[in-house]
């Protein structure tokens, strides 16, 4: 790079150079989903001319991503008609629990993530995430209430242990592509998506 004889770059040297290129490259600013944006999404969902099943599915995913700081690939199937059995979130991976926490009863989900991204750099092959119900001022974006409402109207309240948790009323997997398309439709009048920016699934994690 300094007009010296070209050295044999190590793996880490190549990664540093690629990192510098990524920093210098012009990229759309990643927005963070805040409670204010969650409120906007909820308001737009209420006005949308969608089926009740589709609204509750979308909102359940929004609250789960936001409250659990999940990557979309950790809870949504990659394809609408097939899924990765070793990594997709299926029915047996989510358990509703009610226990006493600091003397008060709390309801929460235990969500087993199989092969999360962090497992590549650690010996752990899976991790369990606790997602608690929200009360008081945050009750309106409670993931427990949103998931319960979704489950009540989709597939007669049945989440099969060996099938993706998030499927639509037709039984098809609710993919990241489908979720992002729904978010874009809800917020398209409020945000400029033409430059590649806006809010998408990764923004729910960025807001944490």
Image (spheres, helix red, strand yellow):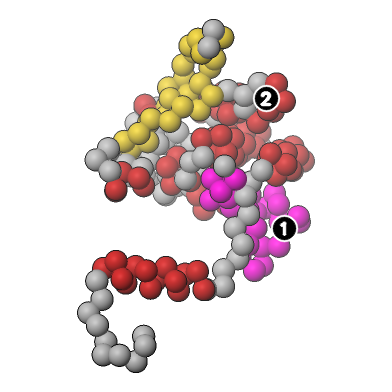
Q: Which quarter of the figure has residue 128?
A: top left
The residues tagged by marks 1 and 2 sit, at their Cα atoms, a distance apart of 26 Å
Mark 2: few/some/many CA within 10 Å (<14, 14-19, 20+): few
Return the residue nearer the eye: 151 or 4. Answer: 4
Return the residue nearer the eye: 200 or 180. Answer: 200
**Within the magenta stretch, is there residue 190?**
yes
Q: Which quarter of the figure has residue 193?
A: bottom right
Residue 11 vs residue 147: left or right? left
Determine the residue positioned at 53% across, 51% down. 202
- The picture places residue 153, in percent across and down from the top left corner, at 59, 26
What span is colored magenta in the figure?
Answer: 182-207
Determine the residue positioned at 46% across, 16% down. 97
Determine the residue positioned at 62% across, 50% down. 32
- The picture places residue 30, in percent across and down from the top left corner, at 59, 58
Residue ID for mark 2: 139
- Establish if 41 lies above or below 150: below
Return the residue nearer the eye: 13 or 77. Answer: 13
Residue ID for mark 1: 191
Q: Which quarter of the figure has residue 61?
A: top right
- Where disc 1 sits, the SS reads loop
Determine the residue positioned at 47% across, 19% down. 96
**Within the magenta stretch, is there residue 137?**
no
Identify the mark nearer the N-term, 1 or 2.
2
- The picture places residue 76, in percent across and down from the top left corner, at 46, 42
């Amino acid at each position: 790079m300094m007009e010296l004889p070209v050295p044999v770059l190590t793996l880490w040297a190549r990664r540093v150079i690629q990192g510098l290129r990524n920093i210098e490259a012009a990229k759309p600013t990643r927005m963070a989903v805040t409670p204010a944006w969650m409120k906007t999404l909820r308001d737009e969902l209420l006005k949308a001319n969608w089926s009740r099943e589709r609204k509750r599915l979308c909102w359940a995913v929004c609250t789960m991503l936001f409250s659990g700081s999940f990557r979309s690939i950790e809870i949504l199937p990659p394809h609408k008609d097939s899924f990765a059995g070793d990594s997709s979130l299926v029915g047996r991976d989510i358990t509703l629990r009610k226990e006493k926490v600091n003397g008060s009863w709390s309801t929460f989900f235990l969500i087993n993530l199989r092969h999360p991204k962090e497992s590549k750099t650690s010996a752990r092959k899976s991790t369990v995430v606790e997602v608690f119900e929200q009360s008081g001022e945050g009750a309106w974006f409670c993931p427990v209430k949103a998931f319960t409402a979704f489950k009540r109207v989709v597939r007669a309240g049945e989440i099969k242990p060996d099938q993706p948790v998030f499927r639509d009323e037709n039984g098809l997997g609710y993919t990241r592509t489908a979720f992002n398309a729904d978010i874009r439709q809800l917020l398209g009048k409020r945000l400029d998506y033409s430059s590649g920016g806006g809010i998408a699934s990764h923004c729910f994690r960025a807001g944490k």
